[in-house]
Image (spheres, rainbow, N blue to C red):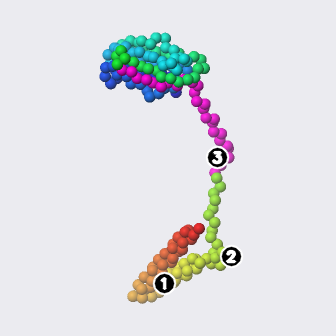
Amino acid sequence: MSESLVVDVNQDGLHTLAVPGSFRASGSFDVRLQNHGEATHVYLHLDDALSSIASIPESHHYVDKDDIQVVRVAVEDGATGSGTLEVTTAHGATTEGVPVEVGADAPEKPPVEVDESLAEPAPQESEPVPALGGAGGAGPDVVPAVALGGVAILLAVATFTVSGTAAIVLAVLAVVTALAAAAYVAVNRRRERGRP
């Protein structure tokens, strides 16, 4: 948490002020008046709520050209509260207010305790192997797939034993049969996954 509230004076032109949207401090804090241009007068004022727990030794400050002036805001020990710090320049023509919250820091989150068992790899759960047909039999999608696969293998072997046009026909039949077997298995798996 920053303990310095930075006010940029004349940064965007003569008599301009740039302040943070809000500020929080655990106790006493500094206001840093950073002048980016011509020398100017800056006034600091604590509203009633903030002045009940904090004070500024002097409200009027002359900040020289391109200079930084640090003003201490003294907060009573252990005091908490909130209010507004008003910053004014150009004899009141430009005024900005900064909501200020004073109090103890937010309690830190307790550290996360790491158990030694977290270093051990988790046991891998193996996917169950589907039983062929439940109690000992072949499943409904396994039998046709095996049959079509067997036909494809027989056709492929037969291709090597015959020659000419018959070999080409057998080779084409082997490929078509293998594709049919693959398509059949894929469709049945999709159906199985779609079941509740």
The first of marks 2 and 1 along the sequence is: 2
Is residue 102 in view from this perspective? Answer: yes
Placement of 120 over or under 126, stated as above or below: above
Residue pictured at 45% horizontal, 83% vertical = 173
The residue singled out by tag 3 in the image is: 119
User: Residue 101 location in percent, x, y?
Assistant: 52, 25
The first of marks 3 and 1 along the sequence is: 3
Residue pictured at 54% horizontal, 17% vertical = 52
The first of marks 3 and 2 along the sequence is: 3
Residue pictured at 63% horizontal, 68% vertical = 129
Q: Amino acid at mark 3?
A: Ala
Placement of 49 over or under 139, stated as above or below: above
The residue singled out by tag 1 in the image is: 155
Residue pictured at 67% horizontal, 44% vertical = 116
User: Between residues 99 and 121, which one lies in front from this camera angle?
Assistant: 99
Residue 108 colored in magenta in the image: yes
Relative to residue 33, is residue 148 drawn left or right?
right
* Of labels 3 and 2, the one closer to you: 2
Q: Secondary structure at mark 3?
A: helix
